[in-house]
Every structure is written in C-alpha cells, then in structure tokens.
Amino acid sequence: SPVACFAGSPSVLLQGLFNTDDQIEFFSFTNDGISTTTIESYGYAGGVANSTTIAEGGFAPDATIFDQLGNFVVSDNGGHCDETATDSVSGLCDDPFLQISTAGTYTLALTVYDNLAVNSLSDGFKQTGNPGFTCAENGGTGDFCDVTDGLFTPRTGAWAISIAGATQVADITSNTPEPGTLPMALAGSVFVVTLPRRRRRKSS
C-alpha cells in the first residue's frame, strides 16, 4: 500500500535488501509543482535519515527516474560528496542524489551500479537475468562486488533511500507500471536539478 508523504514534510525513508546484482526496486512519487522532491540514497556510505542511523556497506547504486509515460528522465550514481556521506572503506561517496521540481508522477528505479536502463521503462535494464555481474567483471563469483573502487571489494545487498517533498510515495516493486498506465501527463517540461559529480571509478 502507498506510503503517504505530504510536500514539505519530513522525508519518507525506505530500506531493504537485494539478493542478487540484477534485482531492482521500483518506487512511485508525485511532485506537486510547488515543492522540490529530493531523492537521496544512504545504503552505500550510510548516514542518518529520519532519525534513523543507516550503516555503510551496501552496494553502489544507480537511481533512474522515468516520467508517467515511462520515458527516461535522468539517472545518477553518486559523486555528490557535499551532499552525501563518504564511505570509510572505499573513500567514495557513491550514493545518488537527485531533485525534481516539475509537477507529475514519476517512477524511480533503484539498481546496482551499471544495471542501467536500456532506454525507456518498458525496454528494461541491461543486466536483467545476469545475477553476479559485478563480481564476474573481475573474474569472480557472488554478488555485490564494488566495481567503483577498482578493487571489487565485497559489499552487501542493503539499500536505503529517502524521498522528501513529494505528495505521495509508494514502493511499487510488485506492480511496476507500464507506459501509459500512470496518471495524466506532466504540466510543462520536466525540470531536473543534479549536483556536479566528483567521483568516477577508481583505477586499480
């Protein structure tokens, strides 16, 4: 069932655990065109959200936003060291940080780093059906190897994400919307704010 969040109220914190690299978590959120919706991940480097302390150590995530028709809007994989925490092991700030300011209903997809959207939501993601792709990239086995640190350090499947400034938030993983099934079109063009990225994959 939807988790309600009124614009301007404290953020909604959602947490969970992936079992494999190719798993995806989907969320729906609505922006009222007045407030800015801020999406911030905490699973990789940890932090405090909604008075909840979140441990570092989760996988490096990608966050991708689609509009109500399933069209790609923006994706992010971290590097906002002025906004998110820095992991004590890798020295990286790999938690995504995104902001949306245009009225409409959106779908947010949370994936393991490099499981990117092919194009639109209906086109799927490039690592679907390929569990263990992060460790396999270094010739290893298992899941949640950190490909961003250049050392493929083992991580966990833990994720945590906050969504603030939305009029409604829901985890829709078991009922992912198809293009055209979400509410009517956005009012005007999409306006997306992202902060400059300061990190990229480390060299080994």
Image (cartoon, rainbow, N blue to C red):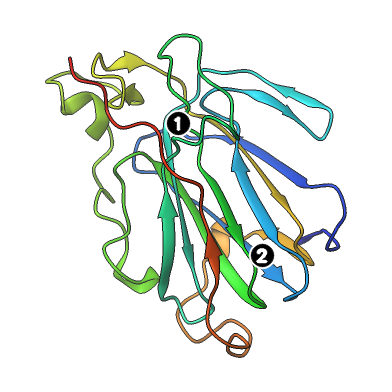
Q: Nearer the viewer, residue 189 or 140?
A: 189
Looking at the picture, which amino acid does disc 1 mark?
Answer: Asp
Which percent across, then down, holds residue 6? 86, 62
Q: Is the residue 96 above or below the residue 25 in the image?
A: above
Residue 94 bears which disc, if any? 1
Q: Is residue 1 visible?
A: no
Q: Is residue 153 left or right of residue 28?
A: left
Looking at the picture, which amino acid does disc 2 mark?
Answer: Phe
Q: Is residue 165 left or right of residue 142?
A: right
Q: Quadrant of the N terminus?
A: bottom right
Q: Nearer the viewer, residue 117 or 79?
A: 79
Name the secondary structure under disc 1. loop
Q: Is the residue 159 above or below the residue 72 in the image?
A: above
Q: Nearer the viewer, residue 15 or 84?
A: 84
Q: Nearer the viewer, residue 25 or 118?
A: 118
Q: Residue furthest left?
A: 139
Q: Residue at x 29, y 42 (%)?
A: 114
Q: Is residue 181 visible?
A: yes
